[in-house]
Amino acid sequence: MPHISAKGQAMPDSPIRKLAPFANAAKARGTHVIHLNIGQPDIATPDVALNAVRNLDRTVLEYSPSEGFASYRERLAEYYNSVDVAVTAEEILVTTGGSEALVFAFMSCLDPGDEVIIPEPFYANYNGFATLAGIKIVPVTARIEEGFALPPMEDFERAISSRTKAILICNPGNPTGTKYPDEAMEALAQLVKSRDLFLFADEVYREFTYDGSNARSVLTLPGLDDHAIVVDSVSKRYSMCGARVGALVTRNAAVRQAAMKFAMARLSPPTLAQVAAEAALDTPDTYFDDVRVSYRQRRDALVGGLSSIEGVLCPSPGGAFYAVAKLPIDDADAFCQWMLESFDHEGSTVMMAPNTGFYATPGLGKQEVRLAYVLELEEIEKAVACVRAGLVTYPGRK
């Protein structure tokens, strides 16, 4: 029998989706599963985006240009300028989701064997993207006891080697919801410039912050024109996860030229979804005002409820729609599976993501779970009650 490739064997499972068979089995038994495992909001997609598709006046769904439709990139540039990110349409490459944008960035800027430094815990699929590109992730650890603040620059300095080519951050963060303050971003910019590194920034949760200001884009930091590369997406901003439209944004012409070669090789980003994404840019500001209020209420209900349980530590996130909780348990993977396989509370249980899959350092996150507060308040409150009851009877409680 032919052998599977080393890269195929090295691709990691998703901690977000790997428990799906247990959730499906629980549903088959009649248990109501509350899905806090994945960042799929229940917020309605803006009508302007859906109507653009419903009323589409096309007879052929043709290829789009490899860099994306010019009209969409022009509108995107207007959007970025409206949030104080000064870019032009030529500095934007439309991609098939933010995932493809990051893969293009990795492959354009790093050679196989090169290293990218990432604060952990980090979005688990970064592991898979790094495997695709043949590069190595070097973690610097943020700690739940410190609210997952950006690690000190000394930690980044110690992680730099002769193979280090880039640093990657997510701001606000997934899985932690941490929003980095300006002074931390400015310190990171100084380090990147002094060490001549690329700075990749996953900014897909830009609008979802809870202190009255958006997270600062790396493209607003002075002196980073040749260093900064932003990964963006419509998935979370407009609750359009299934559209699969993202963007790679950079002022570095050489990076854009390299990324464009990968873009041409995959032909084009999806035509129909770009129509919806362009129309979504007409979404009124009140949509985001309402969404932020809703997420803040959900966050407070989840974090407040979990923090009231004896032995639970759950920092209040400043952005995105995720929280990480440290539980009095032996093993997060076992607990999350047990909640689906062997437990229900008043007919319900909770699907969570064990946080072990969001760390690169073996052994970290063993007592942590990630929860996405993307459901209505009633479901959030039920989920907290389930976790509370589950911790009472879980055989591996510490």
Image: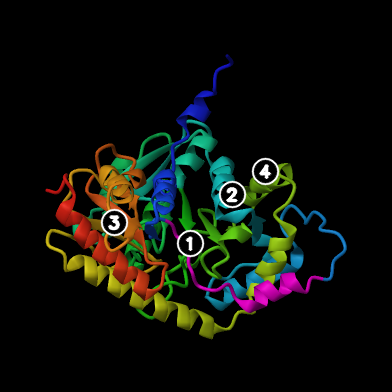
Q: Disc 2 on helix, strand or loop? A: helix
Spatial CA distance of label 3 from label 4 is 47 Å
- The one of 181 and 125 positioned closer to us in this rendering: 125
Q: Who comes first in sequence, dot 1 or dot 2?
A: 1
Q: Given this view, does label 4 or label 1 mark the residue nearer the observer?
A: 1
Q: Identify which residue is drawn at 70% across, 70% down.
A: 74
Q: Who comes first in sequence, dot 4 or dot 1?
A: 1
Q: Which residue is mark 2?
A: 100
Q: Identify which residue is drawn at 50% across, 79% down.
A: 288
Spatial CA distance of label 2 from label 3 is 38 Å
Q: Who comes first in sequence, dot 3 or dot 1?
A: 1
Q: Who comes first in sequence, dot 3 or dot 4?
A: 4
Q: Which residue is mark 3?
A: 344
The quarter holding residue 82 reads bottom right
The stretch of residues the image draws in magenta is 38-56
Q: Given this view, does label 3 or label 4 mark the residue nearer the observer?
A: 3
Q: Disc 4 on helix, strand or loop? A: helix
Q: Position of residue 163 (x, y in %)?
A: 43, 34
**Which disc, if any, is residue 40?**
1
Amino acid type of disc 3? Asp
Q: Identify which residue is drawn at 22% across, 65% down.
A: 306
